[in-house]
Image (cartoon, helix red, strand yellow):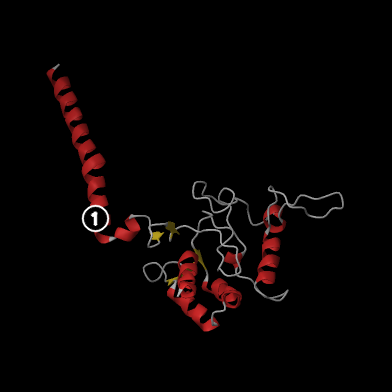
C-alpha cells in the first residue's frame, strides 16, 4: 500500500510542478521576453494612427481595390481577406474551377453579378492586365492572380508591385520614381538572408503613400 501512495504522491507533485512551470512560468517568461525584445511584433504588428485608430496589422492582407492603392493577392479567406476564416481554395492545378472560374448566367448566356461567382485565374489575369495597362500577351506575375494558402498574405512580389506602380503614380499624381522608392522601402528581404523570396508589404506601402498625400 505504501509504494502505491508514494507513487501517487510523486505523480501529483510532478503534475503540480509541471503545471506551474509550463502553464505559468514559461508563458510569462515568453511574454516578458517578447515585450522587451519585440514590443511591436508582440502586440500583433498593429498600425495605429496618432489618434489611436488601428488601421490593420502588417501581418495581414487587406482588400485594397482603388486605383490609388497597390492591391494584394486575391483571397479565398471567408468572403475575402477575413482574418477569422483564413484558408485557400484547396483547388488543384488541374481544376477547371481554378482556371476558368464559376459564373452565373442570364437567359442570354451572359455572366451576371452573383455572390456565388468565383473568378478563375483567366478572369484575374484579364482584369489585372486591363487595370494596369498591360497588353493582351504581357506576362502577369503568378502572385497577382493566385490566392495564397492563408488568404491573408500581406506581401506581393516585387515584379507585381512594379507593374502596379505606374497606375498608382497616375492616380495619386505622384512621380513614378517616388512610388518606386516607396516600394523599395516596403520590401522585406529573404528570411535569414536566404529563405524564400523578397516581398513588398502592401499595407505598409499604401500607408507610406498616404503620408505623402497628407503632407
Residue 88 horizontal/vertical position (percent): 56, 52
101 sits left or right of 17 in the view: right
**Left or right: 101, with 15 as reference point:** right
* Residue 211 sits above or below residue 16 on the image: below
**Mark 1 crowdedness (10 Å alpha carbons): few <14, some 14-19, many ≥20:** few
Residue 120 lies left or right of residue 55; in this view the side is right
Comparing 52 with 103, the one in front is 52
Q: Position of residue 39 (x, y in %)?
A: 29, 59
Please tell me which residue lies in front, 130 or 23. 130
Dividing the picture into quarters, in which one does residue 159 lie?
bottom right
Q: Is residue 160 above or below residue 119?
A: below
Helix, strand or loop for disc 1: helix
Q: Quadrant of the C terminus?
A: bottom left
- Residue bearing the label numbered 1: 33
Quarter of the image holding residue 50?
A: bottom left
Left or right of 132? Residue 34 is left
Residue lying at 72% horizontally and 52% vertically, measured from the top left = 102
Judge whether residue 14 can be spotted in this image.
yes
Residue 179 against residue 60 in the figure, above or below: below
Q: Quadrant of the N terminus?
A: top left
Measured from the top left, where is residue 180 in percent x and y?
51, 79
Amino acid at each position: 500500500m505504501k509504494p502505491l501512495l508514494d507513487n501517487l504522491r510523486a505523480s501529483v507533485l510532478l503534475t503540480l510542478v509541471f503545471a506551474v512551470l509550463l502553464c505559468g512560468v514559461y508563458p510569462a517568461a515568453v511574454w516578458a521576453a517578447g515585450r522587451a525584445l519585440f514590443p511591436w511584433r508582440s502586440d500583433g504588428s498593429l498600425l495605429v494612427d496618432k489618434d489611436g485608430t488601428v488601421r490593420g496589422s502588417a501581418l495581414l492582407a487587406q482588400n485594397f481595390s482603388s486605383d490609388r492603392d497597390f492591391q494584394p493577392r486575391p483571397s479565398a479567406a471567408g468572403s475575402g481577406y477575413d482574418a477569422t476564416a483564413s484558408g485557400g481554395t484547396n483547388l488543384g492545378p488541374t481544376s477547371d474551377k481554378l482556371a476558368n472560374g464559376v459564373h452565373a448566367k442570364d437567359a442570354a448566356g451572359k455572366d451576371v453579378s452573383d455572390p456565388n461567382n468565383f473568378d478563375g485565374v483567366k478572369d484575374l489575369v484579364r482584369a489585372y492586365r486591363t487595370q494596369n495597362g498591360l497588353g493582351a500577351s504581357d506576362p502577369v506575375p503568378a502572385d497577382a492572380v493566385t490566392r495564397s494558402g492563408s488568404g491573408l498574405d500581406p506581401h506581393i512580389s516585387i515584379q507585381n508591385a512594379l507593374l502596379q506602380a505606374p497606375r498608382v503614380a497616375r492616380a495619386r499624381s505622384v512621380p513614378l520614381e517616388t512610388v518606386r522608392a516607396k516600394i523599395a522601402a516596403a520590401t522585406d528581404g529573404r528570411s535569414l538572408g536566404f529563405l524564400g523570396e523578397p516581398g513588398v508589404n502592401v499595407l505598409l506601402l499604401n500607408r507610406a503613400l498616404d503620408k505623402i498625400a497628407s503632407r
